[in-house]
Amino acid sequence: MSVTHSPRKDGGFRLNGWHVLAGMVAFFAVVIAVDATFTVLAVRTFPGQVSVTPYEDGLLYNRKIAQLEAQERLGWRAAADAQPGTVILDVRDASGQPLAGLVVKAKMERPATEAGRFAPRFKEVAPGRYEAPTGAISGAWDLTAEAADARGNTFVAERRLTWP
């Protein structure tokens, strides 16, 4: 006696192993194709090169680290304050005494753009207290001030200041 399979009488679709295999292969083929496309597009739009002078940037970074270490050994501290039309910088030594006679060079710029960048001119108004006129500015500004004494010691302070 033999078993015979008779075709379905309703003529409908019958799912078998080949259909399941084809569906799985098609699914993973689509996933791999989409991943490959996105990878190619990502590499073409940003190849990973951030700087055109990476070696020189590395040397500058090493100098910056050395400068920060020397600054830490000095123990100087600075505080900046935003007053209407003026920026005030207070510089003190490791023992908290005001540092007089410093030459302060600075720049002020917006956090998100270089538009409006300017260099305020600081003058010593009291021992360790330096002021510079800013004019009628408002909003957030980044101050980078470099103070140097007569012996060549330098101190760089970066502060974000906000005017109403």
Image (cartoon, rainbow, N blue to C red):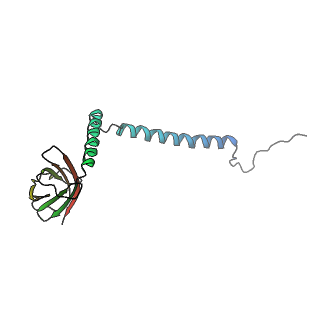
- Image quadrant holding the C terminus, namely bottom left
Q: In this picture, is 7 found above or below 130?
A: above
Question: Could you tell me residue 91's position as x and y percent?
Answer: 18, 56
Left or right: 50 as drawn, with respect to 9: left
Left or right: 83 as drawn, with respect to 9: left
Q: How many numbered dots are placed on residues in this image?
A: 0
Instruction: Name, please, the residue furthest toward the front.
Output: 95
Question: Could you tell me residue 131's position as x and y percent?
Answer: 11, 59
Please tell me which residue is depicted at 10% across the width and 52% down the height of the picture. 101
Question: Could you tell me residue 15's position as x and y percent?
Answer: 69, 46
Left or right: 124 as drawn, with respect to 75: left
Question: Could you tell me residue 120's position as x and y percent?
Answer: 11, 53
Q: Nearer the viewer, residue 60 or 94?
A: 94
Q: Quadrant of residue 87?
A: bottom left
Instruction: Name, please, the residue furthest toward the right.
Output: 1
Q: Quadrant of residue 84?
A: bottom left
Q: Nearer the viewer, residue 25 or 104?
A: 104
Please tell me which residue is depicted at 42% across the width and 37% down the height of the picture. 40
Please tell me which residue is depicted at 31% across the width and 39% down the height of the picture. 50
